[in-house]
């Protein structure tokens, strides 16, 4: 054996060990021909950040086209070199991950990418390079990055994070994808919405084309909580890619969430996202937020939990492109029709807030499916001629600079990205709260077809809400002054438009850069104007901070501390915004109710509704009026609850054990007893005659003035066995026993066993049915959930009322509760 050769073993080279980001830039081998040196704004940004790098949260604002990707990547490598740990660089889409990685290669910077569950190399895991990944990978429930010891995170396009984070904390149950779950969930709240006068809206949800939303208030979620959890648990949400990740966040927090119903889906989401619970926001992790606009501090705080410790915003002319903004509504109120005609001969991008709004553009523009957006955008970039591309709710992450696309339409106000935001905007009128969020989306929209100072293009504004928003001075104060000037110029130009041909002519003048256009543009943009100052009221930031603190405490179930946050600030919140005050009152009521203080809870619920009528009214927990009559079944249900000396209500402790044999594990006798108990907990007179008298049915359920149910247990019968003549004869004999020994004249007959036919000689009557034992197990779970909700909702004096309300809404009143069971007429089985 020859000796092992160790001569080639050398110490590893410590490449890119510099910590100063400017020094790193000087050392890398750049192959990108467009990069000669750092631009002035880039150098300023890097040097300023390097001085403040130890701060926990730093915002970096660089206009579109100012080279923030290079700056961000240099910061990322600097942090890797300093910490010798793991650093994430987060993008809003896979397309941008690939684009950023490609740029990194041109800059000579090593990176790892992670998307579609795969790493591109081992540099990140060995702490030699940052990992470029998506917001989706970082923020989804159960993310693999949660367990990584991350030292720093760079959020690129940080303005995009708000709706992405909200999406990952939102459980969406689609009508088409989960019809049984959707139907059962919606049905839970029928009686409530009928009782508060919303029956019409509720019934309209049956039409998939209905665009209305119903907000389920938190007190109603609590009242139905056990049944909600039964439905959600049975749906096995953790097994579906569409629901597994949000369910990871929400599975133990549903009672703390807002619930919204639409004709196509159900959304369950926290009222205030507890983002600071995520490991990326711990004190030891440093965060950098890159954006062309970080928006106002209140919007940033709602997204990331706190305002930045420092904002670095070097002066740059990048992004200040030449732009003509037109308002076709001056030609005709049907401004979409005017815009369609005016841009017919142009390649154009169209941005709309929802797929519903996109229908106005059907047949005119390509509308890609959600999973085809990236490839459709790539095809559009390469297309010649006059194609039209429409994107719904995509205000960032798409770059079409220069000749790629010079005409864009922004149609309608960019709100409603999610059911809760839509409810807050359309129903609660929280326009002040959402103003900075809308402004950020508008700014991002304008940057989709423009990059640098030398770029030029045309933007058409359609949709009355968007036009009015942009032309309101208080809103303009949230936009960059340069963009505000362009909007004012566009308003003046638009006043001269008379026809769609005039709009097309103005577009042509800008695109060909006619002398008349350039002269008017330069003269107007050089004119100084008095700028409306943005609202500097610190209350908007204080409210955002309060919401974040309340949300974090509520998520931890520290109800008393959470309640203090809103209670102590409610007066000042109402002064700032009565609608926001009403929204806070509603969730303060929830905190009180979870504390067990129902009196104060009802007070807050009523206050919220009194101020903002679109917050649904509560059903006060009051004693039933004198003379109110309840059926015997309901009174029997109410009697079963235990009431302590302190007035606490409890479900019988043995109930789970009583139902246990319904899973098929017990003997025939145990199964019969479990069925008897089920009848008892339903509030029926449930007996086992055969066990007591050696004759009669195995189990008998009765209630005064209603039909009886005669049950024969055949759960031990093999699936291949048929119901014999002897079985049918026995049932007939037991039916006669019921007639002879009770006052019942109307009796249902039920075999509990396999779904099998009768033998040819059996001749079953039309009134004999069969069901499997598992169906009664399901019914027992519905009953248990109902009893739990009665216990949680009722006071001792209101137990009959609560029992009637819950049993009625759950379809548990006798004998309609039999509709919960899949039964088959024996005669019909072949």
Image: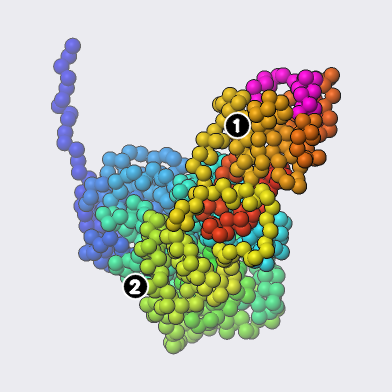
Q: Residue at x 71, y 41 (%)?
A: 702
Q: How is the image coloured?
A: rainbow
Q: Residue 67 location, x and y as percent? A: 37, 62
Question: With 57 as the anchor, is 208 left or right in this view?
Answer: right
Is 785 magenta? The answer is no
Of the 4 image quadrants, the one containing the C terminus is: top right
Graded by Cα atoms within 10 Å as few (under 14), some (14 to 19) or many (20 or more), the crowding at tag 2 reads some
Graded by Cα atoms within 10 Å as few (under 14), some (14 to 19) or many (20 or more), the crowding at tag 1 reads many
Nearer to the camera, 406 or 221:
221
Of the 4 image quadrants, the one containing the N terminus is: top left
What numbered label is drawn on residue 315?
2
Q: Is disc 2 placed on a helix, strand or loop? A: loop
| Residue of label 1 | 673
Nearer to the camera, 254 or 755:
755
Q: Residue at x 37, y 58 (%)?
A: 558
Q: Is disc 1 placed on a helix, strand or loop? A: helix
Q: Residue 168 location, x and y as percent? A: 48, 52
Q: Residue at x 70, y 78 (%)?
A: 332
The part of the chain drawn in magenta is: 714-734
Q: Is residue 683 above or below residue 272?
A: above
């Amino acid at each position: 054996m020859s000796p092992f050769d160790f001569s080639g073993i050398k110490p590893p080279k410590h490449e890119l060990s510099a910590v100063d980001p400017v020094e790193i830039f000087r050392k890398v081998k750049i192959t990108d021909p467009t990069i000669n040196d750092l631009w002035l704004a880039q150098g300023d940004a890097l040097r300023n950040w390097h001085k403040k790098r130890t701060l926990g949260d730093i915002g970096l604002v660089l206009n579109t086209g100012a080279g923030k990707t290079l700056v961000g990547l240099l910061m990322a490598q600097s942090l890797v070199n300093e910490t010798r740990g793991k650093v994430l660089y987060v993008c809003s889409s896979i397309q941008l991950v690939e684009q950023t990685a490609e740029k990194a290669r041109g800059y000579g910077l090593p990176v790892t990418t992670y998307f579609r569950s795969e790493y591109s190399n081992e540099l990140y895991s060995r702490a030699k390079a940052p990992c470029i990944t998506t917001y989706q990978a970082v923020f989804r429930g159960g993310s693999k990055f949660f367990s990584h010891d991350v030292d720093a995170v760079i959020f690129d396009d940080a303005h995009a994070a708000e709706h992405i984070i909200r999406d990952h904390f939102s459980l969406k149950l689609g009508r088409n994808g989960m019809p049984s779950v959707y139907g059962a969930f919606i049905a839970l709240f029928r009686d409530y919405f009928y009782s508060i006068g919303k029956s019409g809206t509720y019934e309209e949800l049956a039409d998939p084309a209905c665009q209305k939303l119903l907000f389920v208030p938190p007190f109603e979620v609590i009242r139905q909580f056990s049944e909600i959890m039964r439905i959600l648990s049975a749906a096995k949400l953790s097994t579906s890619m569409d629901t597994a990740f949000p369910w990871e966040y929400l599975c133990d927090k549903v009672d703390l969430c807002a619930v919204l119903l639409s004709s196509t889906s159900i959304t369950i989401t926290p009222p205030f996202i507890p983002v600071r619970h995520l490991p990326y926001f711990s004190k030891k992790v440093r965060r950098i937020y890159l954006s062309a606009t970080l928006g106002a501090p209140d919007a940033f705080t709602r997204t990331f939990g706190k305002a930045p410790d420092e904002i670095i915003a070097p002066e740059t002319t990048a992004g200040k492109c030449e732009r003509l903004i037109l308002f076709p509504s001056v030609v005709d109120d049907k401004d979409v029709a005017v815009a369609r005609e005016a841009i017919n001969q142009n390649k154009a991008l169209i941005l709309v807030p929802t797929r519903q709004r996109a229908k106005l553009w059907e047949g005119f523009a390509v509308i890609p499916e959600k999973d085809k957006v990236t490839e459709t955008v790539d095809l559009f970039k390469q297309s010649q001629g006059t194609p039209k591309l429409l994107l719904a709710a995509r205000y960032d992450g798409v770059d079409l600079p220069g000749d790629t696309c010079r005409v864009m339409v922004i149609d309608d106000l960019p709100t409603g990205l999610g059911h809760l935001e839509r409810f807050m905007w359309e129903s609660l009128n929280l326009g002040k709260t959402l103003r900075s969020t809308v402004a950020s989306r508008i700014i991002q929209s304008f940057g989709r077809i423009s990059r640098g100072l030398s770029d030029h293009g045309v933007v058409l504004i359609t949709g009355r809400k968007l036009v009015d928003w942009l032309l309101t001075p208080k809103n303009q104060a949230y936009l960059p002054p340069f963009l505000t000037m362009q909007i004012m110029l566009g308003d003046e130009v638009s006043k001269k438009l008379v026809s769609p041909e005039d709009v097309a002519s103005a577009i042509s003048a800008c695109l060909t850069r006619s002398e008349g256009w350039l002269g008017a543009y330069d003269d107007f943009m050089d004119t100084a104007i008095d700028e409306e100052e943005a609202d500097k009221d610190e209350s908007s930031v204080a409210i955002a901070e309060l919401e974040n603190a309340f949300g974090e405490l509520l998520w931890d179930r520290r109800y008393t501390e959470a309640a203090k946050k809103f209670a102590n600030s409610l007066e000042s919140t109402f002064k700032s915004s009565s609608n926001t005050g009403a929204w806070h009152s509603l969730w303060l009521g929830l905190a009180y109710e979870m504390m067990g203080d129902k009196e104060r809870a009802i007070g807050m619920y009523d206050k919220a509704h009194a101020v903002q009528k679109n917050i649904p009214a509560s059903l006060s927990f009051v004693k039933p009026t004198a003379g109110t009559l309840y059926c015997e079944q309901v009174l029997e249900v109410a009697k079963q609850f235990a009431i302590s000396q302190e007035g606490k209500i409890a479900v019988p402790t043995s109930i789970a054990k009583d139902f246990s044999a319904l899973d098929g594990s017990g003997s025939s006798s145990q199964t019969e007893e479990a069925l008897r108990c089920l009848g008892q907990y339903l509030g029926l007179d449930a007996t086992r005659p055969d066990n007591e008298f050696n004759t009669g049915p195995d189990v008998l359920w009765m209630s005064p003035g209603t039909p009886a149910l005669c049950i024969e247990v055949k759960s031990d019968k093999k699936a291949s066995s048929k119901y014999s003549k002897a079985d049918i004869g026995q049932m007939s004999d037991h039916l006669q026993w019921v007639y002879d020994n009770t006052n019942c004249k109307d009796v249902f007959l039920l075999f509990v066993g396999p779904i099998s036919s009768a033998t040819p000689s059996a001749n079953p009557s039309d009134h004999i049915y069969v069901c499997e034992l598992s169906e009664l197990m399901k019914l027992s779970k519905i009953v248990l959930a109902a009893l739990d909700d009665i216990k949680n909702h009722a006071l001792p004096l209101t137990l009959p009322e609560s029992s009637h309300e819950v049993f009625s809404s759950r379809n548990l009143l006798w004998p309609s509760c039999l509709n919960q069971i899949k039964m088959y007429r024996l005669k019909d089985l072949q």
